[in-house]
């Protein structure tokens, strides 16, 4: 009897989780990557066309204040490496691959993606034509949605509560039958 109640609940939870991850997570990560790549492209273009250092500093301050992007400009050093897509934090849902595709589409300049010194941050370096590198350091939270973890907790929590209630009801329903069996 408990399996009759619990299997449909678990099956429903698995189907809902699959649909959520297939639709919501993919769409959400695509939108977050698209927005970040657009911001990096826009700032790169503005820095490349800025007439003086003071305007570049103003662009950097605005990016830090409004976009949660820490931007620095330095002289280009060496050749641009291929993006380091193998670092652990982005391999689960291929977010680094999506970011690389969007940056390739939006920038039209050489760039690289790599892990940053701080744990929950990463860096994108864009090479400008005039021999400068623009470093964008931003938190991982720019590419992940916290709703995913909340959703999973709700799924597990509701399944546990429903199974607990089902066990109480089944115990109360079976108790008179057990007494009747003992009396018989």
Image (tube, grey):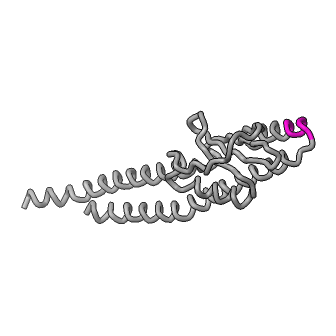
Q: Residue at x 81, y 36 (%)?
A: 61
The vertical placement of 51 against 17, above or below, is above
Q: Nearer the viewer, residue 63 or 116?
A: 116
Q: Residue at x 71, y 42 (%)?
A: 136
Q: Residue furthest front?
A: 78
Q: Residue at x 90, y 35 (%)?
A: 54
Residue 184 located within the stretch drawn in magenta: no
Q: Which residues, given as a range, are shown in magenta?
A: 52-58
Residue 174 drawn at (x, y percent) = 22, 58
Can residue 141 be seen here? The reply is yes
Q: Nearer the viewer, residue 21 or 40?
A: 40
Q: Residue at x 43, y 49 (%)?
A: 157
Q: Main secondary structure of the magenta part?
A: helix
| Quadrant placement of the C terminus | bottom left
Q: Residue furthest left?
A: 184
Residue 114 drawn at (x, y percent) = 60, 44
Residue 55 located within the stretch drawn in magenta: yes
Residue 43 drawn at (x, y percent) = 80, 47
């Amino acid at each position: 009897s408990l399996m009759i109640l619990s299997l449909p609940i678990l099956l429903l939870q698995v189907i809902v989780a699959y649909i959520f991850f297939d639709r919501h997570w993919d769409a959400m990560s695509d939108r977050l990557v698209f927005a970040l790549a657009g911001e990096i492209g826009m700032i790169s273009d503005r820095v490349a066309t800025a007439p003086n250092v003071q305007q570049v500093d103003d662009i950097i301050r605005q990016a830090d204040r409004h976009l949660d992007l820490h931007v620095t400009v330095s002289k280009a050093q060496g050749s641009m490496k291929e993006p380091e897509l193998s670092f652990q934090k982005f391999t689960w849902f291929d977010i680094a691959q999506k970011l690389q595709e969007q940056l390739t589409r939006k920038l039209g300049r050489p760039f690289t993606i790599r892990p940053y010194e701080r744990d929950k941050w990463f860096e994108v370096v864009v090479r400008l034509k005039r021999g400068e590198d623009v470093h964008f350091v931003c938190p991982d939270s720019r590419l992940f949605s916290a709703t995913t973890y909340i959703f999973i907790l709700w799924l597990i929590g509701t399944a546990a509560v429903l199974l607990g209630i089902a066990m109480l009801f089944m115990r109360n329903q079976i108790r008179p039958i057990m007494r009747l069996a003992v009396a018989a």
